[in-house]
Image: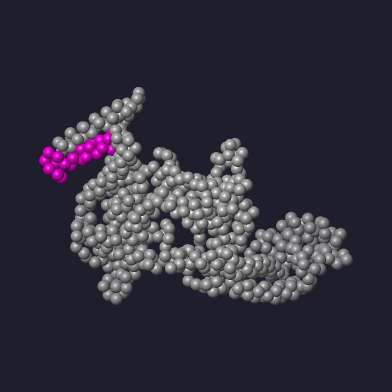
């Protein structure tokens, strides 16, 4: 990654920024520091057009609302994965430049959407009014009639727990002229109509309120509840018919939908281009920006800058300077970058760990999930998804990685002899882990030790690269000697040959002395005592190695659970009913087992990289390279065939 600085004429800025965005390989930095520098401030000011950005944001919001509504009424079958539709550069530019009727079409649809929303609000209001009128259908007086010359009429409700008998008695005590009529009650309220003399209404209201009486308001309604309900029903039918008419307008052909999506993406691209200008500095006649460009692609950038008459300077970053991170791997390793990205990108001065752990990851996953049938199913599903859908980004990388893991699972299933557990008896090419659990445990720990040693080797490489040869010897190579020596001392005579233990003893002694001595050479003051403390680090390495026992544990769990479901199915007998029952149990059981153990294998294979492997050398926390490019949501712009 190289540093790029550019100065150009204001008259060339718009075309240049459009070409750089189309090229999509330059990251443009913010200029906060320079804007805080008095020397810079005396010469320049921040570029940008907030009004244009706001205008485009408004247009994007309208187009997005229209697309969301179209999707609601779209009869097209939704794919499992969302894919961008391919459009040619020519078609994209035709839509983006306003050379079609799409902007007007979007505006019309948005107007329809606003009308539909108003109708929906009216529908909700009508439904609420009808619900309020429903208990009063037996009330035969006009709702606008609330009083006569001497009588006040109150319509209202009390809580269902209120004692209406006591309320009636209390009203009779207050006024013999007051009359209360109960119309109905539901699960929450009781409905009353109260007639009282105007000169007594204050005392009557006080009494009613003591029973939780609330006056209902039928403002705007004239005539009886039944007449109002009839009018509301008629209006409701009109509103719903109009809504359906509006909804039909959103059922548009797929071609037109694609054009609207393309226009939406073009608005996003224009907004990004308008917004990126905030990262530029300008004078009256010129502009300035700086950023980053991948070294391998800088020639393409130079060509555009020269065509636009810009002054530019490209420099290699200083040693130790942080740069944006863009990982580069071949097509086989590239998918496994997903595992690294799920953790954290490497710092710009670190080694990309993906090519180093990729094989380990696939092997570990397969060993934990080991089953021929499960592996073939996983690989088959992933390959189908890759062929059926044009996946991109993280989705593509994860699915592709899982296809590798499916093949590994099938291979380990052949080695261990598993096909849906023991549904079909297959002679293992290597051994049955259920019969040789201790051997597989030892093999897992050896495989884990190799994995850890590779991680430590990467650390040594980085130290030697930075000129820290002595640190590499003390932090890595001496530990190789010490750990291998301990292993030979404990197991050499039993598993290798007589005398291996003696060799291991001397290797462990030499390694231990070096581990302590290194800190005496490097340390100052109390730091010299760290050599003795470092020997305690042996327990950490032991714990890391034992972590790889999960390779055995998950492999056994997958196999045993599969066999249990097979056994449950066989218990149903051998007749027609038994066969049908076996199939049902097997399908349900193996689906559950597949899902749980596939997830478990993915998680634990990742954990062995993140905790044990990365813990030996990897810091992470790199900032991703974020080029100024055409970021589209719905369409993928492709070059036209010549």
Which residue range is magenta in the image?
473-500
Residue drawn at x 22%, y 59% as measured from the top left: 415
Q: Nearer the viewer, residue 149 or 92?
A: 92
Q: Residue furthest right?
A: 149
Question: Magenta stretch: dominant SS?
Answer: helix
Side of 229 where 459 appears, left or right:
left
Residue drawn at x 39%, y 68% as measured from the top left: 388
Q: Quadrant of residue 518?
A: top left
Q: Nearer the viewer, residue 7 or 346?
A: 7
Residue drawn at x 71%, y 57% as measured from the top left: 212
Side of 487 where 155 appears, left or right:
right
Side of 501 where 174 appears, left or right:
right
Residue 406 vertical position relative to residue 341 in the rendered view, above or below:
below
Regarding residue 631, the answer to whether it shows in the image is no
- The location of residue 268, given as percent across then percent down, is 55, 59
- The location of residue 445, given as percent across then percent down, is 25, 47
Say whether residue 625 is magenta.
Answer: no
């Amino acid at each position: 990654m190289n540093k790029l600085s550019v100065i150009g004429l204001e008259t060339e800025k718009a075309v240049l920024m459009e070409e750089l965005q189309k090229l999509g390989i330059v990251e443009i930095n913010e200029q906060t520091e320079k804007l805080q520098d008095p020397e810079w401030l005396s010469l320049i000011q921040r570029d940008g057009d907030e009004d244009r950005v706001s205008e485009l944001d408004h247009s994007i919001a309208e187009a997005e609302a229209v697309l969301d509504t179209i999707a609601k009424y779209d009869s097209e079958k939704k794919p499992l994965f969302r894919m961008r539709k391919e459009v040619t550069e020519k078609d994209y530019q035709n839509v983006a430049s306003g050379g079609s009727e799409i902007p007007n079409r979007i505006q019309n649809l948005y107007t329809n959407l606003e009308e539909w929303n108003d109708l929906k609000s009216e529908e909700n209001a009508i439904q609420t009014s009808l619900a309020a009128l429903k208990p009063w259908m037996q009330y035969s007086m006009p709702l606008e009639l609330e009083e006569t010359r001497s009588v006040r009429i109150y319509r209202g409700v009390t809580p269902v727990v209120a004692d209406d008998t006591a309320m009636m008695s209390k009203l009779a005590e207050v006024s013999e002229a007051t009359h209360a009529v109960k119309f109905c009650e539901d699960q929450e309220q009781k409905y009353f109509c109260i007639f009282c003399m105007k000169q007594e209404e204050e005392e009557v209201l006080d009494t009613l309120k003591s029973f939780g009486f609330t006056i209902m308001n039928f403002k705007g309604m004239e005539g009886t509840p039944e007449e109002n309900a009839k009018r509301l029903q008629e209006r409701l039918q009109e509103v719903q018919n109009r809504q359906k008419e509006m909804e039909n307008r959103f059922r548009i052909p797929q071609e037109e939908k694609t054009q609207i999506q393309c226009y939406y993406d073009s608005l996003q691209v224009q907004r990004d281009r308008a917004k990126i200008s905030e990262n530029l500095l300008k004078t009256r006649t010129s502009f300035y920006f700086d950023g980053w460009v991948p070294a391998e692609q800088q020639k393409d950038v130079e060509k555009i800058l020269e065509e636009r008459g810009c002054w530019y300077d490209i420099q290699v970053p200083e040693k130790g300077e942080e740069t944006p991170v863009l990982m580069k791997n071949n097509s086989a390793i590239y998918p496994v970058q997903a595992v690294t990205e799920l953790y954290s990108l490497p710092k710009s001065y670190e080694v990309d760990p993906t090519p180093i752990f990729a094989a380990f990851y696939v092997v570990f996953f397969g060993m934990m999930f080991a089953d021929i049938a499960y592996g073939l199913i996983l690989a088959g599903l992933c390959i189908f998804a890759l062929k059926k859908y044009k996946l991109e980004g993280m989705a593509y990388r994860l699915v592709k990685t899982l296809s590798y893991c499916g093949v590994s699972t099938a291979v380990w299933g052949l080695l261990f002899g598993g096909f849906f557990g023991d549904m079909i008896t297959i002679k293992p090419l290597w051994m049955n882990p259920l019969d040789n659990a201790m051997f597989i445990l030892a093999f897992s720990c050896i495989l884990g030790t190799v994995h850890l040693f590779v991680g430590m080797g990467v650390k040594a490489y980085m130290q030697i690269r930075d000129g820290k040869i002595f640190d590499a010897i003390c932090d890595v190579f001496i530990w190789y000697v010490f750990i291998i020596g301990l292993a030979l001392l404990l197991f050499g005579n039993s598993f290798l040959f007589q005398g291996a233990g003696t060799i291991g003893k001397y290797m462990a002694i030499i390694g231990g002395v070096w581990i302590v001595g290194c800190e005496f050479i490097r340390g100052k003051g109390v730091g010299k005592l760290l050599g003795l403390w470092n020997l305690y680090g042996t327990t950490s390495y032991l714990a890391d190695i034992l972590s790889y026992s999960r390779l055995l544990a998950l492999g056994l769990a997958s196999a045993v659970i599969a066999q249990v479901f097979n056994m449950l199915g066989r218990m149903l007998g051998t007749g027609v009913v038994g066969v049908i029952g076996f199939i049902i149990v097997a399908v349900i059981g193996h689906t559950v087992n597949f899902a749980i153990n596939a997830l478990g294998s993915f998680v634990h294979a990742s954990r062995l990289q993140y905790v044990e492997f990365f813990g030996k050398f990897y810091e992470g926390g790199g900032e991703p390279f974020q080029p100024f490019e055409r970021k589209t949501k719905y369409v993928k712009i492709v070059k036209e065939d010549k």
